[in-house]
Amino acid sequence: MLSPRAPAPIPRRRLLSISAPSPGRISIGDSNRISFSRGGEKKRGRISSADTPARMATDSALTKLAPLEAILFDIDGTLCDSDPIHFCAFRELLQQIGFNDGIPITEEFYSANISGGHNDDLARSLFPDMDHDKAMQFMDDKEAFFRKLAPGRLKAVDGLHDLCRWIEGYNLKRAAVTNAPRANAELMLSLLGLTDFFPVLVIGSECDRAKPFPDPYLKALELIGASPDHTFIFEDSASGIRAGVAAGVPVVGLTTRNPAKALSDAGASLLVNDFQDPKLLSVLEELKPVTENGQA
């Protein structure tokens, strides 16, 4: 039997509950300023003087990107909170084959050893003594199980669709960049209603090297014709953040599931809870491009 090492405990939210989006939205008023509303209370997307240290930390890496030209998005855990579904699929199928002497994997093990990984790498790390083709067949079976579970369970991260409308309003370039298999990525974009929103979809396994190498993000920049000097990335995993940093593009880390410290240590320029986070709205206010009529 295969017995994975026991990872150190990692404080994090539980994976098994997928919360419904909470009230709140990004809106563009007559002044084209971003506002943040939740439960009837509206707040402007500005950071107060009390938040000066956080503002200073983001200024150097993000606000220098103005005017913003493009935004690149990871998919799993970034556009949608898909980790609970992946965790369930891995846990059930690994238990079926007697992994770890048949003891179900924990959320901590999943976060430390699986989340954000590329399937080829995961096959080698999870099954070092197994024939690689057989290990990859397990990964293919797991992805098929994920696709079976996803419809009806996959939920967008809070504020995603309002952010997408803001991006369309300013005609920003964009691409989805993922280590997920193409079938998974296309299914998730379809379930989220974003198939037409992304003109470019880059798959890690279709590049020379997947994340954490920079190749997928460099390919996306090339395909959409964007400069890294006016682009930033949304990511939720340390692996993805390292890929973005290696590509020379600032990364905003979403603390959807993975520990904030891990994302910060990987090089994230800013950490946000979701796409409604006031810290993010403040940065977008600073970066919004100038429109054809000369107004921001």
Image (spheres, grey):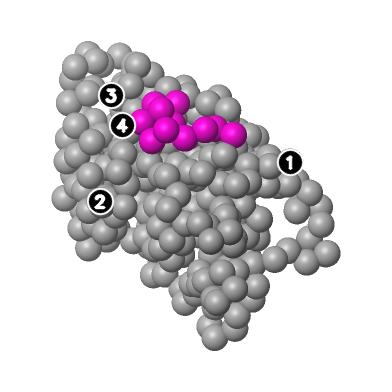
Query: Disc 4, disc 3: CB below 8 Å?
Result: yes
Q: Which amino acid does label 1 sit on?
A: Ser
- Mark 4 highlights which residue? 203
Q: Main secondary structure of the magenta part?
A: helix
Q: Which of marks 2 and 1 is nearer the N terminus?
A: 1
Q: Which amino acid does label 2 sit on?
A: Thr
Which element type, helix, strand or loop, lies under badge 4?
A: strand
Q: Which of marks 1 and 3 is in front?
A: 1
Q: Earlier in the sequence, mark 2 or mark 4?
A: 2
Q: Which amino acid does label 3 sit on?
A: Glu
Q: Which residue is drawn at 16% across and 50% down?
A: 148
Task: Name the quadrant of the N terminus.
Answer: top left
Distance of label 2 from label 3 (alpha carbons)? 19 Å
Quarter of the figure with residue 295: bottom right
Residue 40: x and y in percent read 54, 86
Residue 22: x and y in percent read 46, 73
Distance of label 4 from label 1 (alpha carbons)? 30 Å
Please say whether residue 272 is visible from this viewpoint: no
Distance of label 1 from label 3 (alpha carbons)? 33 Å
Q: What residue type is labelled 4?
A: Ile
Among all residues in the image, which is located at the extreme bottom?
40
Quarter of the figure with residue 65: top right
Q: Magenta stretch? A: 218-229
Query: Disc 2, disc 4: CB below 8 Å?
Result: no
